[in-house]
Image: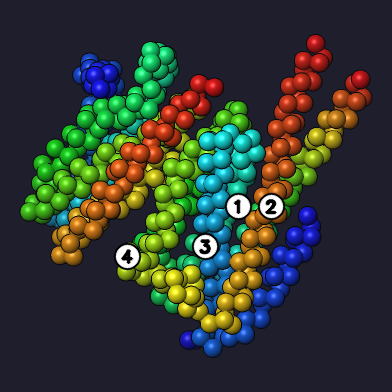
Amino acid sequence: MEHHLMFVYSAYFFTFLVLILIGINFFLAFNRSNKNISSFKNKAKKNK
Amino acid sequence: MTFIFISLGLWYGLFNSPPDYQQGETVRIMYVHVPAAWMAMMVYLSMTIMSIFALVWRHPLADILSKCSAPIGASFTLIALVTGSIWGKPTWGTWWVWDARLTSVFILFLIYMGHITLVRSFEDEYKGARAGAILTLIGAFNLPIIKFSVDWWNTLHQPASVIKLDGPAIHIDMMIPLILMALGFLFFYFSFLLINVQTELNNRKLKKLFIQSFSKKN
Amino acid sequence: MKKFYRLILRDIHLVIKGSSDAGAALLFYLLAIIMFPLSSGTESTLLISIAGGAIWVAALFSSLLSLDRLFRSDFEDGSLEQLVLSGISLETIVISKCFAHWLTNGLPIVILSPILALIIGLDFSYWWILCLTLLLGTPSLTLIGATPAALSCAIGKGGVLTALIILPLMLPVLILGSGAITAEISGLGGFGHIYALAAILPLSLLAVPFLASKALRLGWE
């Protein structure tokens, strides 16, 4: 088989791109929800 | 939890030296394509089991697990479809063909997307998660179609060579990176499932606190 | 058993009175099929090769349209709750609604299909396999679409989302149905497909009442 390395690279690139992208997205959502909860709890404490 | 990430990275790193590349470079795509496809099906299978738990025994965590698994499963399905297509071009000469396995995996992707859309279109997340469980069960029949499609229809996609009744038909040198990648993907699923579930629980609690704060002010 | 028949009769009455869109769905079936020869030129061999599939696609869309309303009107005005409260099990109601839907949508599709095969240019000696696949397939289409229709009651709105969910689920039936016709025409024998279609029917008959009832109860929570 000839040099189809380009295909291999693009396949791996795509795979890891997707995984990293969704990983980052999930991570950011997680951090955001944590921040929201702690800011909410702080607000509750301040109001008391 | 980051521990799991590190073990992921290790698995991935190890695969990068597949010892046998005499068949030509394109076979290397198998090391991402096959584990991705395995994950796509495995995630849906676990979603089905969780959905049964959610609907029959009303376990409170079950439908959250199912809801949060869906985006990960959809991503793996997408990876499987695209890497399969990329692999197909040099080996079969075509980007896509409507053979049984490709079509049924594509249907799986559509079911995943429908699930994600359905669950998020409810005002009440609890109802949304339960509706997702119902949808998962309907779509579950697609799974055996995927698995057995390469045996029933004799078209383009290669039939099963790893999990057969009389042991794997694939060389051990190629098995190792394959299994390593599969395990890596598996850990990816587990770790991000946990993160997503925690996010979902946080968001639900947030909503509750928000509503409570209104009643407290009065 | 009597209650079952009376439920079916009730739905058919509603159709005849005109307060459901079963007739419109059938008209859509006709229109959709007519679109194919109009868009691809009347003499083309292309049309003949896709004729069986085109009829199946039109059948799919027709049932898709009428499925949306399957439970919704009864759900919204409360008559579904009344039926359940009067002691009829929800699963029975689901099956009876599906059967009534098939009688007013699937069965006419099957009956009309030979005529439409003529219009669209399908080789007429194969009309029997067209009818057979549609006969086996349309009940499955009704059943498969019933659960998302019930889910759309729980959501409150529906429309595109319901169609988005129903269509991938119906695709295997479509593939098997039109595949049977193509296989028969090319001489390979379509009976494998027919057996698979025949297998889907009892499976969905078992699973759907349970799941659709769950979805309806979800809407009542």
Q: What residue sits 78% from the left and 55% below the top? A: B1
Q: Secondary structure at mark 3?
A: helix
Residue under pointer 2: B192
How far across and down, in percent of the image, does residue C132 sit? 17, 47
Q: Kindly check if marks 1 and 4 are in contact, taking CB atoms under 8 A apart as contact.
A: no
Q: Which mark is residue B37?
A: 3
Amino acid type, label 1: Ile
Tell which of B123 and B190 is nearer to you: B190
Residue under pointer 4: B153
Instruction: Evaluate whether label 4 is on the same chain as label 2.
Output: yes
Tell which of C122 and B195 is nearer to you: B195
Q: What residue sits 39% from the left and 56% below the top? A: B145
How far across and down, in percent of the image, does residue C188 sit? 18, 65
Amino acid type, label 3: Ala
Q: Earlier in the sequence, mark 4 or mark 2?
A: 4
Q: Secondary structure at mark 2?
A: helix
Instruction: Evaluate whether label 2 is on the same chain as label 3.
Output: yes
Q: CA distance from mark 1 to mark 4?
A: 29 Å
Q: Secondary structure at mark 4?
A: loop
Q: Secondary structure at mark 1?
A: helix
Q: Kindly check if marks 1 and 2 are in contact, taking CB atoms under 8 A apart as contact.
A: yes
Residue under pointer 1: B72
Q: Kindly check if marks 4 and 3 are in contact, taking CB atoms under 8 A apart as contact.
A: no
How far across and down, in percent of the image, does residue C117 sit? 13, 46
Q: Earlier in the sequence, mark 4 or mark 3?
A: 3
The chain that hosts pointer 2 is B
- Left or right relative to C164: residue B127: right
